[in-house]
Amino acid sequence: MARIVPSDLTQLALSGAHEPEIQTLALLRDRLPEAYTVFHGVHWTRQYKGRTLYGEIDFVVVNQAGQVLCIEQKNGGLEETAQGLFKAYGDERKSVGDQILRSVDNIREKFAYQVGKRPGLEIEYLVYCPDHTLKQLSAAGLDRERIVDAPKREKLAEHVQTVLPSTQGTQDTWAQQVAAFFRQTFEVVPDVHAHIDAQEKTYTRLSHGLLEVLASLEMQPLRLQVLATAGNGKTLVARHFFDQCIAQGGRPLLLCFNRPLAERLGHLVTRGGLVATWYQFCDQFLQSRGIQLDFEAMRTQPDFWHQAATQLEEQALTATLGDAWRFDTLIVDEAQDFEAGWLEALRLFLREDATMLWLEDPNQNVRGVAPPALLAQGFVGYRSLLNYRSPEGIARFVNGVLPELPFTCANDLPGLGAGTLFYQDPTEQPRLVGRIVGRLLNARFRPQDIAILSCRGLESTALKEAQRVGNHTLARFTGDYDLFGNQVYSKGQVLFDTVRRFKGQQAAAVILTDVAPRAHHLAQELQVLFCGMTRATVRLDLVCDRSNAWVKERLAEWA
């Protein structure tokens, strides 16, 4: 059985992939031996004379020697003319031969540009037309041996092995380079926020996505501020640049404000470097200098972390920093939560000409932090409003409810939409949430697919004391940490947390509670709501205060 990338056919079906192509992918998976890897839906881009060229190959097959076969599938009827084989798209006709050969040439040239011209990519092609029987062999404009038509469709896997023979043994360095090229360059990238299945990363295609653009930039030194909406792939970019720094022999530093996100990132990136929150970074560095922070003082000293940051700067300025505290790359994810002074302190730990990547979403500035003036400090800015995470049904709801925080839906998933329930008394919420959870489980969501998130803090939510909702127990942060510093959660079936703590993550089904934006903090609380709503990948539910003025104005029509 061949390895396929993306690996989940069900996810491909949900994401809008055509059924005939899914059937072909299943056929290749089942009939090719394990020596082959099949990439599905490969989007390529290439710069040419100041323009960006785009294209797509239905399937790319790679053997153990790093040799490549591109397969273009054409469903339905085709037209054979003296000029070649054509496929009609509405009123437009496109040459099948020109299309596949152009894609092959562009892939070969991009590979040569990124990896090197020698030894060069060995790349072949097949045209697969399962619904068409080729009649005029001389009219096809392609090598007849490279066309698999309807009479031969059951032999597609055999044709693949004829054109691209399998090789024995494990992948050598060259073959690994080829496979990595297709994974990274063609946007077949792991979405670090999808953890429905802990054993396997879910793959998503970021159509002309953020990673492709930023990975192609050439700056020395790299100073980049990325302002991108929720679901745009910022965390994927953080992972890419972190791993790239390690591959080049450097030491990267990846920081975020959110503790759960830092823990998750730490498990996803290549070993080496340092992944932490800003507060963890302060604590760990001061410990390395023999200074132990008194965390009990946090309860009585509002400026506790400001004092810790001051100590950090003083120690960094007066001490000779060892290699463990010198970094070649700084990446800040969810940077809208970072204060300007923190960046200045971090500069003390960077080597000369270090890469600096600042990834933020101004629409999720839930702490109300004033952003640093990075463009005045030599940074180049890049903006994107494309949201790849929220499916069309949820995106339409979010844009309708929060027009002041706009984004563009770039996800063709229909999703299961959004719903609202209303309470008169906040104490009704556990019962209402239990009803929603039961409905989701009946719809075949698993408990681990569901996240219940409060728009308030853990100490002020109506679910503060709740151990269960309906018949379902809650898994919630206990306030304790294990020996490795990881947060300890209570044993439960369904996750309960706050929007602020769940930032940078996602869940198939999200239930937002305590939806009651207050007028005196309206701008900030709407950003919390936006952040929470954009965590959902399939279904979104809101539990709202019926008496709240904003709820009456914005959500009444969605009842």
Image (cartoon, rainbow, N blue to C red):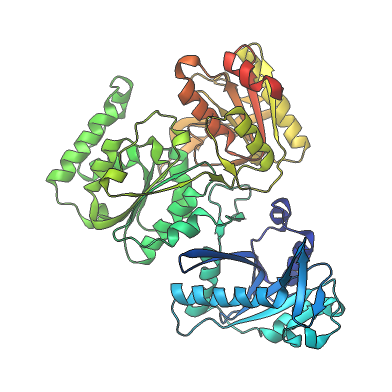
Which one is nearer the viewer's eye here, 160 or 386? Answer: 386
Q: Is residue 83 above or below residue 488?
A: below
Which residue is at a point 51% across and 70% down the rendered structure image? 181
Q: At which x and y percent is residue 212?
A: 49, 59
Left or right: where 165 falls relative to 463: right
Which residue is at a point 66% across and 30% down the rendered structure image? 541
Q: At which x and y percent is residue 216?
A: 43, 62
Which one is nearer the viewer's eye here, 424 or 209? Answer: 209
Q: Residue pushed farthest left?
A: 318
Which residue is at a point 79% across and 63% down the rendered structure image? 20
Q: Quadrant of residue 32?
A: bottom right
Which residue is at a point 61% across and 84% down the rendered structure image? 168
Q: At which x and y percent is residue 195?
A: 59, 48
Q: Is residue 315 above or below residue 397?
A: below
Q: Quadrant of the C terminus?
A: top right
Which one is nearer the viewer's eye here, 21 or 382? Answer: 382
Q: At which x and y percent is residue 348?
A: 21, 47
Is residue 457 something one can see in this rendering? no
Q: Quadrant of the N terminus?
A: bottom right
Left or right: where 400 falls relative to 119: right
Is residue 191 something one can see in this rendering? yes
Left or right: where 294 falls relative to 418: left
Q: Is residue 158 above or below residue 219?
A: below
How many numbered discs? 0
Left or right: where 202 falls relative to 264: right
